[in-house]
Each structure stands twice: as C-alpha cells, then as structure tokens.
Amino acid sequence: MRSQRGWGSVAMSCSLLLLLLLLRPRGAGGCLHCDRPFLRGLGVLLGDAVPSEVPNRDTLIQRQVQAFERLYSTHLPEKHHRVLDVHGMLAVKAALSSWLRALKETPWKGVHLLQLTLAQHRDSLRTRLREALESFADLAVTEGPVLDCWTCLRINAQCFDGELCGEEDPRDAERKEITLYLFLVCQSVLLASAALL
C-alpha cells in the first residue's frame, strides 16, 4: 500500500514538473543576449578568424563574445528602447555575421589590432541597434512579433506603442507585473515544497 502511494506521488510530481517545463516562457531567440545559439555561432566565427597559435585564444574568444552579448544595454533612457521587431534584430545579426565572415578572410595582424577592430565594430553596431530601436519606436503598426529585450520574450500584440497595449497608467502596469511575479514565486515555492514531500 505504501509503495503504491509513493509511486503515485512520484508520478504526480513528474507530471507537475513536465507541465511546468511545457508552460515555461520561451526565449525570443532574437535579442543578442537572449539568443544563445547565435552567440555560440559568433564564438565559432571568431574561432575561425583567430589562429590556433594565439596564446589564451579561448579566453580571448569568450571575452569578445561576452562583449557582443552586452551590446544591448538594459539601461537605455527610454522605456520603448526595450522592444524591437524581429526583422530589425535579424538585420543586425546578419550584419554582424557577415562582418565576422569577412574578418576571417583578412590576413592576421595580431591580437591587439583584432581587439581594436572588434571594439570599433561593436560601437558601430551599437549605433545601428540604437537607430533600429528609435525607428521602431516611431512605427504605428507592426508586422509580426515584437521582441522584448528586457525579458527575452516575444510580444504578439498588434497595437504596440512602446509600451504594453491598453495600459494608460505606468504604475498600474507595474503593479500588475509585481503581482504576477509574486504569484509565480509563491506558486513555484508551493510546487517545489510539494515535490520535496
């Protein structure tokens, strides 16, 4: 009798875990810091551009990928800078990938020149990203999903004006976000404690 009850609670815990895994928010796969496969691809492209005899090659590549990951700053002055359409982000990523492929074809001139070139390209890419954010903020109608680069989620609302649709009072929207966050934290604590019992 006890073993049947034990298997029942294990099965229930497994089903709850599966449900939570299926319902978890998916990453947008668009913003640079959210798109892990793209960042791994950047590491591969940089690895092709840096010769294998360079000392601390792996550390150099990892630091440069992290610098590109931090390209999008979450401390931009306007709240509407947190969002971008998928098409705009794909254009930024395509420009970065094609530039790194072209860098692979150039002759090797040393680590310091490579780091200087990468820093200059990050600055130009940051400017391009800011321009894309500014031009997207002026749009009235969007085609397709919108990326929220603060939460790494897609927003499928068609009536988008720099903020979530239908919220006139920012304090009310913030209050709703806090309530939702606290609800999810309490629910996860309860489910975790039930799973441990």
Image (spheres, grey):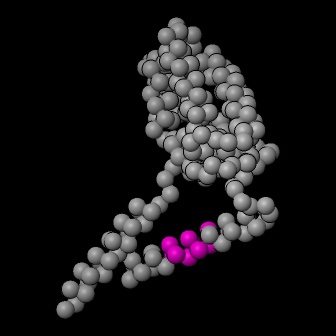
Is 131 drawn above or below residue 167 in the view shown?
above
Q: Which quadrant holds the C terminus?
A: bottom left
Indicate the position of residue 111 as horizontal and vertical percent values.
Answer: 58, 18
Q: Position of residue 101 (x, y in %)?
A: 50, 18
Residue 41: x and y, percent? 46, 31
Determine the residue positioned at 60% across, 18% down. Answer: 114
Residue 54, given in percent of the width and then of the height, sits at: 49, 20
**Left or right: residue 102 compared with residue 112:** left
Compared across the picture, whether 35 is left or right of 11 comes to right
For residue 149, above or below residue 2 = above
Q: Is residue 154 visible?
A: yes
Task: Locate residue 104 relative to residue 177 in the image: left or right.
Answer: left
- Asked whether the viewer can see residue 55, the reply is no
Q: Is residue 163 above or below residue 116?
A: below
Measuring 64% from the left and 18% from the top, which residue is drawn there? 117
Query: Magenta region: which residues?
Result: 181-189
